[in-house]
Image (tube, rainbow, N blue to C red):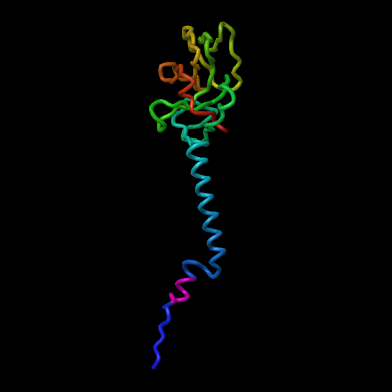
Amino acid sequence: MGMHTEKAKPPTWLRTAFIGRHPERTLRRVAVLVVAGLVVFVVFSCLLLPIRVEGISMLPTYRNRQFNLVNRLSYCRHEPQRGDVVAIRTTGFHIMYLKRIIGLPGERVAFHRGHVTINGQVLSEPYLKFACDWELPPEVLGPDEYFLVGDNRSMPPGEHFMFKASRARIVGKVLF
């Protein structure tokens, strides 16, 4: 009586359920999924920042609760430009404002009869759809400051966030 021991093989159905009928093909699929997951993680944590608009200060350009993406690399080769819609970091990366740049470093920005003036010249703003009657005195921007304001200027200026921000607080440019 010779006893020979065979290794116990797992049932075929169990192997098929976890690995499939073609283990090489399954491993390739797993590798593709892992790489795709890493790419998505890097893109959405380092390059593109998802952001949701809260409030009406950017109407009609951006609606309340609208989802958008911020390109964090948009200003690697050049500085922010007038008219760009950008995300501004306030406290940490979880709270940001979406605003339009209207004033550049070193400029004098004012509101007169509802119109923005830059160094005394009226700024053309074709993206505005609502009338404005703001009257605000001139503010001179520092060498690293930008003046930001929303597109919905029908709101009273006291209810509207507009401010000077340093270049370091600009996270990136909105894509759409």
At 53% from the left and 66% from the top, the residue drawn is: 23
User: Between residues 109 and 122, which one lies in front from this camera angle?
Assistant: 109
At 38% from the left and 27% from the top, the residue drawn is: 91
Name the spot of residue 122 as percent of width and height, x first.
59, 10
Q: Quadrant of residue 71?
A: top right
Name the spot of residue 66 as percent of width and height, x first.
49, 35
Name the spot of residue 118 as percent of width and height, x first.
56, 10
Quadrant of the frame with the C terminus: top right
Residue 14 inside the magenta-drawn segment: yes
Query: How many numbered discs sit on the rendered protein?
Result: 0
Please identify the residue farthest to the front as the structure is shown.
2
User: Between residues 113 and 98, which one lies in front from this camera angle?
Assistant: 98
The residues colored magenta run: 9-15
At 59% from the left and 23% from the top, the residue drawn is: 78
User: Between residues 174 and 60, which one lies in front from this camera angle?
Assistant: 174
Please identify the residue farthest to the bottom as the structure is shown.
1
Quadrant of the frame with the N terminus: bottom left
At 57% from the left and 33% from the top, the residue drawn is: 175
Residue 104 inside the magenta-drawn segment: no
